[in-house]
Amino acid sequence: MNAQTQTRPQTFALAAGTTNRHQWHKAALAALSTLKNMQTEQIEKYGIKGGKERESLVSVLFCPVINTTAETLYNQIGDDFGWVVTKDNADAIEAAALAAHPIARAATPIEDNRTTPEERAEQ
C-alpha cells in the first residue's frame, strides 16, 4: 500500500446535519472568514514622505498569500479543531479567531509607494 500525503483542507467544514437555519456556527465562520481574508491584504502608502501622506488597506484578489502570519494563525486554528465547526467547539473557534485578528492585522505587509520631496520635484 502506497503512503499518501495528507493535504490540509484550507476551509472549515460544518458538522454533519447542520443547515443554514442553525445559527450557532455563523459567528465562528464570520471570524474565520475575516482571518482568511487578511491573508491577501496589504497596506499601501502614497503621497510625499514627511508631507501629505495617505494609506489604504487593500485586498489583492487572485494572488497567493501575502500575510503569512494570518495564514499560519488560520491553519493553527484549523489544526487545533480538526477543521470542523461543531456546536460544541463553535464558541472556542470564534474566540481563537478573534484573538488572532489583532496579531494578523499587525503583521499586514506594507507596500510603500511614497516619494520624497526631491523625487517629486524631479517629476
Image: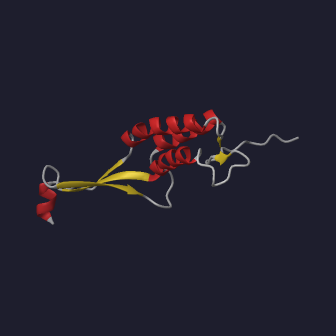
Query: With 57 as the anchor, is 91 left or right in this view?
Result: right
The quadrant of the rendering that contains the C terminus is: bottom left
Which sits in the foreground, 36 or 88? 88
State the residue at coordinates (59%, 45%). Answer: 25
How many marks are shown on the rendered structure? 0
Residue at the outermost right position: 1
The quadrant of the rendering that contains the N terminus is: top right
Query: With 79 as the anchor, is 94 left or right in this view?
Result: left
Q: Is residue 81 above or below residue 66?
A: above
Which sits in the foreground, 85 or 121? 85
Q: Position of residue 74 (x, y in %)?
A: 54, 41
Q: Position of residue 7 (x, y in %)?
A: 69, 44
State the residue at coordinates (48%, 51%). Answer: 37
State the residue at coordinates (59%, 48%). Answer: 23
Name the image colouring.
Answer: secondary structure
Query: With 50 as the anchor, is 76 left or right in this view?
Result: right
Query: With 33 as the anchor, is 121 left or right in this view?
Result: left
Q: Position of residue 66 (x, y in %)?
A: 45, 49
Q: Position of residue 60 (x, y in %)?
A: 43, 58
Which sits in the foreground, 106 or 26? 26
